[in-house]
Amino acid sequence: MTADAGNSAFPHSTPDGAIPRSEIPHSVGVIGGGRMGAGIAHAFLMAGAEVAIVERDDEAAAAGWERTMASVDRTLERSGAAEPRTHYGDRLTVATDAAVFSGCALVVEAVPEDAELKSAALLRAEAAMDPSGWLASNTSSLSITELAVFLQRPERFIGLHFFNPVPVSELIEIVVGEQTSLELVEHARAWSAAVGKTPIVVRDSPGLASSRLGVALALEAIRMVEAGVASPADIDTAMELGYRHPVGPLRVTDIVGLDVRLGIAEHLSKTLGDRFTPPQLLRDLVARGDLGRKTGRGFYDWPGVAQMPAPTNER
């Protein structure tokens, strides 16, 4: 059964909308071991799954393993858990061949926000998976329906938009494509709860819910800096203290990455109109290599971070 234009796109298994109970998939695959991919791998590892990360080459695969285990180490240190590091490391595999996905019940794509790159990664994963497996994309702005066009089993494909940084974020945005099965939506809501996140369910649309709102606010804040209305710190403080935002839009932009913000804004400008046209200041900062926290400088300086270009496999 597939989701239609009615309320069935937002299913609840109980009258009060309680999240259904479901076991975490025993084996989970992640395409890409950059910042987001490693965070997603960490989430499923901590929930008890075996996780396989596939990267483009051996060097990137090794970096993905180190990035994921560094997150595990930080979690163990914060929680004071008694489990040894090997309890998690022994369940983490990295590879360059998608064949490791053959036994995965779920594979999550987490490569950079480029439609052609994501489509190619999803096709490779689907070809390697058992037909009973589920496939997901971590896209923050691209259409799940369009990404599913060339898949053999589009009803088994969904959007699972994790937020950066994944280990401490509390939200997953579940994106329902035109052919996504309602069974998969129910599973996705349960998996989200099992990894300690709160799920929201949205129909496939440009920018989803979170990116569309977040980018709109960030772009206006950047225009205010560009026009000399106030400093980045004062604009952020206005939203933090005046509107109870935990973090202001410009600091969030630094954390997400100015290049990521620019890419999403350009996509939304094409699909939703001029109100999402990126400010020239954003383009200039990205061209200069000031991408935010990952390069040490954006709208803020981030002490202790090397001034170097961001890795190309990170979102």
Image (cartoon, rainbow, N blue to C red):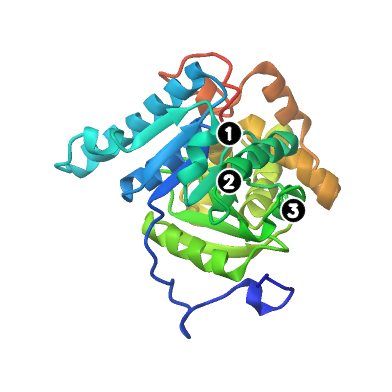
Crowding at label 2, few (<14), some or many (≥20) Cα neighbours within 10 Å? many
Residue 291, position in %: x, y?
A: 60, 25
Camera-nearest label, 2 or 1:
2
Residue at the far bottom: name it: 15
Q: Which numbered disc covers residue 315?
A: 1
Question: Which quadrant would residue 93 be assigned to in this image?
Answer: top left
Regarding mark 2 in the picture, which secondary structure is present there?
A: loop
Q: Which numbered disc covers residue 195?
A: none
Residue at the far left: name it: 82
Callouts 2 and 1 close, C-beta under 8 Å = yes
Q: Left or right? Give the position of 225 relative to 101.
A: right
Rounded to the nearest angstrom, the CA distance separating label 2 from label 1 is: 10 Å
Residue 293, position in %: x, y?
A: 51, 27
Residue 271 vs 283, above or below: the answer is below
Callouts 3 and 1 close, C-beta under 8 Å = no
Regarding mark 1 in the picture, which secondary structure is present there?
A: loop
- Three-letter amino acid code of the residue under disc 2: Asn
Q: Which numbered disc covers residue 206?
A: 3
- Three-letter amino acid code of the residue under disc 3: Pro
Which residue occupies 73% across, 63% down?
178
Crowding at label 1, few (<14), some or many (≥20) Cα neighbours within 10 Å? many
Residue 40, position in %: x, y?
A: 45, 43
Q: Left or right? Give the position of 237 relative to 267.
A: left
Quadrant that contains the N terminus: bottom right
Foreground residue among 295 and 25: 25
Camera-nearest label, 3 or 2:
2
Residue 231 visible in the shown view:
yes
Residue 113 vs 162, above or below: the answer is above
Which residue occupies 81% across, 44% down?
269
Residue on which disc 2 sits? 138
